[in-house]
């Protein structure tokens, strides 16, 4: 097996042996069970005259609640990616774990790409697995499914991968704790900057709008989150938001349009840049 | 400086002298700012050459969540060795370092010494032509140290060159064919044991000498002052009577004079003394 895949396998194996996967699975099942109960409760809510809510209203409420629940999942994914990626290389350099392996015919780029791949597989698996379980539970409880579930998974997974890539770059130079904290703060700042951009859109203030745009370019997590939100918005909500004009766009939990293709192309370039930067940084680091 | 195949080469120096840095440079783990070096006929940093090299780092650490067999299999894979040979290689490595009965235990349950043994086993996989051992016995008990010396001799007997980094001088003296002494990143002496240890050392037990008197004894060559015991690390045997009379003339009392062949430690201290001077 080429060294890249050996390091990818090791990363997955470590997460499994250290029971990270088991912990995530148990927590996800708990959240899914709890949210299924919550979603089911929506269908039992009665109006003033004692009648149940009509299906259209159940769908509307479910769609908006699902966006909030998904925000929690994306948060867990971003947090986990930042915490795991932060020490991915630095801790192994500091402990000496990498010394004997790098004395083998192994390129440092293979270590970086392998670890990115391994953690990337875990992020994708978690995004796909948790989305499947959550959407199945919501569908069972309310009969609602978001309009674009595949795109939803892709956007949430890409958000996790972005945090992982940032954590990896930091991990080539900084200690695990420092890198993890910086990645986490960057994720929160990007989200806040996105909210500032929303306010700019609502107020039609280009300076504030630019804050959102620049943050999407520097760290595309919030832009990807908006893609996930768009994938969950039913047509009726989209129509209402569009009718509201710029005010309808000023909300971090709503998206009127899908992310532009230029942004998606930038995300691909951004990933390539982060990986290249990680490789260069690790290659020039003394160990 | 050249290390021929099959030789056990000791690389000595005080802490911070540059021993580990030199090994990392040779293995391509660090980039040299200047100079050249070759390993097995290739310039340092060549990836293919690393297939023929084993390395036990000073800072040894292995995946605690893997078993010893799995760690060795990982190194077989990275080496890379033919998959059909892995089982035999792993079994032999575990046997050589005395970990056969712990092969299926997780490394996290190992003591420091056992982890160092495991690292040595990993370095021996695939019968390398050159093995770098950086302080290979730092975590071992006397039995373990004896075992490692035997392993090193075995490697040399089958034609493997061993580059032994150590500051355990008695250990180096027992196994090495040739040594180099490094200080502040510079080789200050090198040669075979016979070439380096040609002189005589004299150990004297004295009392009644103050600091000034001890300073005056510097005329008798490098001095290792341990209070009651003074060791002149390189002193011609013919000068012993003169030394004794000088000590007595300065008010000192001599209880014991023991000339002996210079040990590596004597020579090492002498070299560092000369370097400082």
Image (cartoon, coloured by chain):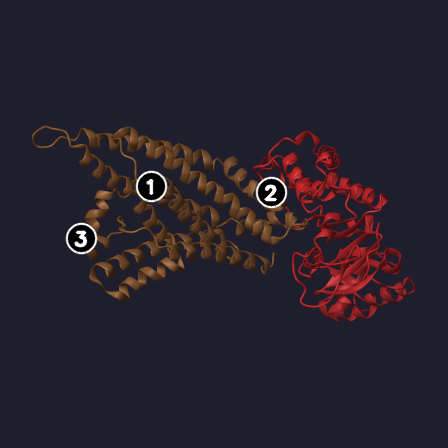
Q: Which chain is brown?
A: A
Local packing at callout 2 (Cα closer than 10 Å; few below 14, some 14-19, many 20+) is some
First in sequence: mark 3 or mark 2? 2
Q: Which residue is mark 1?
A: A148
- Distance between mark 3 and mark 2 Cα atoms: 53 Å
Q: Position of residue B71 (x, y in %)?
A: 64, 39
Instruction: For marks 3 and 2, give the one nearer the viewer.
Output: 3
Dot 2 falls on a residue whose secondary structure is: helix
- Marks 2 and 1 belong to one chain: yes
- Distance between mark 3 and mark 1 Cα atoms: 23 Å
What residue is rendered at 48% in x and 56% in y? A274
> Relative to residue B63, is residue A196 drawn left or right?
left
Q: Is residue A158 above or below residue A46?
A: below
> Relative to residue A187, is residue A249 drawn left or right?
left
**On residue A244, which mark appears?**
3
What is the quadrant of the N terminus of chain B in the image? bottom right
Is residue B207 visible in the rendered structure shown here?
no
Q: Position of residue A187 (x, y in %)?
A: 37, 53
Residue B119 in which image quadrant = top right
Q: Chain of mark 1?
A: A
Q: Chain of mark 2?
A: A
> Relative to residue A51, is residue A116 drawn left or right?
right
What is the quadrant of the C terminus of chain B in the image? bottom right
Q: Is residue B123 above or below residue B29?
A: above
């Amino acid at each position: 097996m080429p060294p890249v895949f050996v390091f990818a396998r090791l990363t997955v194996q470590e997460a499994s042996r250290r029971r990270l996967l088991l912990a995530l699975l148990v927590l996800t099942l708990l959240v899914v069970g709890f949210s299924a109960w919550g979603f089911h409760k929506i269908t039992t809510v009665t109006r003033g005259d004692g009648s149940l809510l009509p299906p259209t209203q159940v769908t509307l409420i479910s769609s908006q609640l699902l966006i909030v629940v998904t925000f929690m999942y994306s948060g867990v994914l971003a947090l986990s990616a930042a915490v795991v990626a932060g020490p991915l290389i630095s801790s192994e350099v500091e402990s000496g774990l990498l010394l004997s392996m790098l004395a083998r015919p192994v390129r440092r780029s293979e270590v970086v790409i392998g670890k990115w791949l391994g953690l990337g597989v875990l992020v994708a698996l978690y995004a796909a697995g948790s989305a499947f379980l959550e959407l199945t539970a919501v569908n069972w409880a309310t009969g609602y499914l978001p309009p674009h579930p595949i795109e939803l998974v892709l956007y949430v997974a890409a958000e996790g991968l972005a945090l992982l890539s940032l954590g990896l770059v930091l991990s080539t130079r900084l200690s695990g704790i420092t890198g993890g904290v910086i990645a986490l703060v960057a994720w929160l700042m990007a989200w806040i900057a996105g909210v500032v951009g929303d306010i700019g859109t609502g107020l039609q203030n280009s300076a504030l709008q630019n804050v959102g745009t620049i943050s999407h370019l520097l760290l595309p997590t919030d832009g990807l989150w908006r893609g996930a939100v768009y994938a969950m918005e039913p047509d009726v909500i989209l129509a209402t938001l569009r009718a509201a004009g710029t005010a309808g766009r000023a909300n971090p939990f709503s998206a009127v349009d899908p992310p532009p293709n230029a942004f998606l192309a930038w995300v691909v370039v951004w990933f390539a840049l982060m990986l290249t930067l990680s490789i260069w940084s690790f290659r020039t680091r003394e160990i | 400086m050249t290390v021929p195949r099959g030789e056990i080469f000791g690389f000595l120096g005080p802490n911070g002298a540059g021993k580990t840095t030199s090994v990392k440079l040779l293995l391509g783990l660090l980039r040299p700012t200047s100079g050249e070096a070759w390993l097995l006929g290739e310039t340092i940093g060549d990836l293919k050459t690393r297939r023929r090299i084993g390395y036990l780092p000073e800072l040894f650490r292995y995946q605690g969540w893997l078993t010893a067999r799995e760690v060795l299999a990982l190194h077989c894979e990275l080496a890379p060795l033919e998959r059909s040979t892995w089982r035999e290689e792993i079994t032999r490595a575990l046997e050589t370092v005395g970990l056969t009965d712990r092969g299926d235990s997780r490394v996290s349950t190992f003591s420091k010494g056992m982890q160092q043994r495991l690292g040595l086993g990993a370095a021996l996989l695939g019968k390398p032509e050159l093995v770098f051992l950086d302080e290979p016995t730092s975590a071992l008990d006397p039995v373990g140290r004896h075992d490692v010396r035997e392993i090193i001799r075995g490697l040399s007997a089958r034609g493997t060159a061993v580059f032994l980094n150590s500051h355990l001088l008695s250990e180096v003296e027992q196994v090495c064919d040739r040594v180099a002494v490094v200080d502040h990143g510079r080789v200050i002496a090198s040669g075979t044991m016979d070439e380096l240890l040609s002189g005589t050392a004299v150990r004297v037990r004295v009392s009644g000498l103050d600091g000034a008197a001890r300073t005056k004894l510097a005329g008798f060559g490098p001095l290792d002052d341990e209070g009651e015991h003074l060791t002149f690390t390189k002193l011609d045997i013919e000068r012993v009577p003169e030394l004794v009379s000088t000590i007595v003339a300065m008010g000192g009392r001599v209880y014991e004079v023991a000339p002996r062949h210079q040990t590596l430690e004597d020579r090492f201290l002498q070299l560092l003394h000369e370097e400082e001077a």
